[in-house]
Amino acid sequence: MSVLVIGIGNKYRSDDAVGLEIADSLSECNIKNCTIQRSSGEGIALINLWEDFDHVILIDAVKSDSKAGTIHTIDLSKESLQTDFFQTSSHLFALPEAVQLAKTLDKLPKTMLVYGIEGKNFDYGTELSPEVLKAKIELTDRIKTELLELSFNILS
């Protein structure tokens, strides 16, 4: 049993890069039974990435009425994905549509967690806003701990 982590984003759209940056940080940890991928968030590509995994963690920037830097956790086995969170995607077929299609086709992994960090700035640029940078560090540590615990349980 292995886990797939997908960091989603655009490295040239400021806070939208947070998912990619977290994926890069987690890659450096070399966690056993864990595959780390980066994605632009195009829906079909996401389904292709997760189709061979039972456990998937997705990380993306989101935009809602919450305070910048807020970390949203969505367990797709318990709740639906709010499509209005992902307004910043430039894809017509992005994460919410991919999840819905995968659900319809019975191609969703057994477990799928979506972590969304509330972005502040989605303009062109390569720097994260201070609020998102702080959330990035917190969420990276949280996911790393979860993956290490899961890896330990898998090996036990």
Image (cartoon, grey):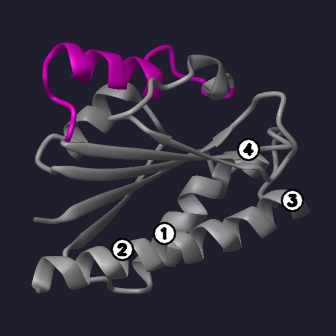
Q: Residue at x 23, y 85 (%)?
A: 152
Which mark sits nearer the N-terminus, 2 or 4?
A: 4
In contact (CB < 8 Å): disc 2 and disc 1? yes
Residue linked to disc 2: 147
Which tag is nearer the camera, tag 1 or tag 3? 1
Q: Nearer the viewer, mark 2 or mark 4?
A: 2
For the residues labelled 2 and 1, the Cα–Cα distance comes to 6 Å
Q: Residue at x 80, y 39 (%)?
A: 122
**Which residue in the structure is indicated by mark 3?**
131
For image coordinates 86% across by 59% down, the residue present is 131
Foreground of the two, 16 or 76:
76
Magenta-span inclusion, residue 101: yes
Residue picked out by circle 1: 143
Amino acid type at image mark 3: Glu
Q: Name which residue type carries label 1.
A: Ile
- Mark 4 belongs to which amino acid? Arg
Q: Report, in whole angstroms, how far the alpha carbon at label 1 lies from the one at label 3.
A: 18 Å
Residue at image coords 25%, 33%: 47
Counting residues from the start of the chain, the first of labels 3 and 4 encountered is: 4
